[in-house]
Amino acid sequence: MSDGNSVLVGKKPVMNYVLACITLFHGGAKEVNIRARGKAISRAVDVVEVVRRRFLPDVKIKQIGIGTDQVTLQEQQQSSSTNVSTIDITLER
């Protein structure tokens, strides 16, 4: 699967990401990858459920991956790192 079939979920409303997924599937994509970090994880799960239950009932969840990214924060002269949870959900038609 190419990176062109990825939807990165952030702070926008859920329906924006749902529309992006539907557009990719109608454009001929067999798989769509939905990715999110931190607080956006619950929004990514909402996107998947809306796509599956409301708009494209033939879409199935192929794979779910969870993990942790280590993010380095730079403040003036100090740098600290923190862990951020990630989720990667692959849908297939």
Image (cartoon, rainbow, N blue to C red):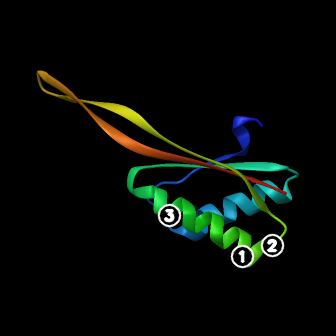
Earlier residue among tags 3 and 2:
3
Quarter of the figure with the C terminus:
bottom right
- Disc 3 marks which residue? 43
Q: Amino acid at mark 1?
A: Arg
Residue at image coords 11%, 21%: 77
Residue at the farthest right position: 28
- Disc 1 marks which residue? 53
Determine the secondary structure under disc 1. Answer: helix
In the image, is residue 19 above or below residue 71?
Answer: below
Dot 1 alpha-carbon crowd within 10 angstroms: few under 14, some 14 to 19, many 20 or more: few
Q: Amino acid at mark 2?
A: Pro
Q: Position of residue 22 (x, y in %)?
A: 75, 63
- Disc 2 marks which residue? 57
Residue at image coords 56%, 63%: 45
Dot 2 alpha-carbon crowd within 10 angstroms: few under 14, some 14 to 19, many 20 or more: few
Q: Position of residue 62 (x, y in %)?
A: 75, 51
Residue at image coords 79%, 49%: 31
Earlier residue among tags 1 and 3:
3
Determine the secondary structure under disc 2. Answer: loop
Q: CA distance from mark 1 to mark 3?
A: 15 Å
Which of the two residues, 24 or 68, is positioned nearer the viewer here?
68
Q: Amino acid at mark 3?
A: Arg
